[in-house]
C-alpha cells in the first residue's frame, strides 16, 4: 500500500499500531517527518511517540510500508476514546 493516506492507530511500546485492517502482515509502523524524496534515512526525522503511549492518534502521511513518510499527527484522543479504539480493533492495552 503506497500513497498518501489518513489512518488511526494507537501507540503501543513506542510504535504506531494501525487500528484498521490494512492487508499488512505487520500492523506497526514508524513515523518520519522526512519526505520520501528527501534523500535522507527516515530515522533522521523519526517522530518520538513516547509522549503518546497508549493514546489513539490520527496520522496523515505517505505510506511506504514500514514507514509513514511526511507524517503529521493531526489529532489525539483522550483516554476513553483510546480505550474504545483499542477494543474495537481487537488490540489489548500494553
Image: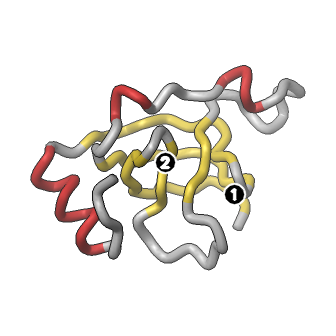
37 sits left or right of 69 in the view:
right
Secondary structure beneath dot 1 equals: strand
Secondary structure beneath dot 2 equals: strand
89 sits left or right of 84 in the view:
right
Q: Do callouts 1 and 2 mark residues in contact (Cβ within 8 Å)?
A: no
Report which residue position mark 2 lands on. Answer: 16
Disc number for residue 3: 1
Which residue is located at x 56 percent, y 73 percent? 22
Image colouring: secondary structure
Is residue 50 or residue 5 the one in the foreground? 50
Q: Distance between the residues labelled 1 and 2?
A: 18 Å
Estimate how packed mark 2 is, as few (under 14), some (14 to 19) or many (20 or more) residues with alpha carbons within 10 Å. Answer: many
Query: Which quadrant: the N terminus?
Result: bottom right
Which residue is located at x 15 percent, y 43 percent? 78
Estimate how packed mark 1 is, as few (under 14), some (14 to 19) or many (20 or more) residues with alpha carbons within 10 Å. Answer: few
Q: On the image, which quarter does residue 30 sit in?
A: top right
Rendering coords of residue 58 (x, y %): 38, 48
Is residue 64 or residue 28 the one in the foreground? 28
Rendering coords of residue 84 (x, y %): 18, 64
Which residue is located at x 30 percent, y 45 percent? 54
Rendering coords of residue 36 (x, y %): 79, 38
N-term mark: 1 or 2: 1
In the displayed structure, 47 sits above or below 53; it is above
Depth check, mark 1 against mark 2: the one in front is 2
67 sits left or right of 55 in the view:
right
77 sits left or right of 31 in the view:
left
Task: Please state the total of marks drawn on the protein image.
Answer: 2
Amino acid at each position: 500500500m503506497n500513497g498518501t493516506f489518513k489512518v488511526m492507530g494507537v501507540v503501543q511500546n513506542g510504535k504506531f499500531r494501525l487500528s484498521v485492517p490494512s492487508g499488512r502482515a505487520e500492523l506497526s509502523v514508524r513515523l518520519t517527518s522526512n519526505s520520501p524524496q528527501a534523500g535522507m534515512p527516515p530515522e533522521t526525522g523519526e517522530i518520538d511517540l513516547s509522549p503518546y503511549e497508549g493514546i489513539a492518534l490520527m496520522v496523515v502521511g505517505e505510506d511506504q510500508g514500514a514507514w509513514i513518510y511526511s507524517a503529521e499527527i493531526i489529532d489525539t484522543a483522550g483516554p476513553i476514546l483510546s480505550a474504545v479504539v483499542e477494543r474495537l480493533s481487537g488490540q489489548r492495552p500494553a
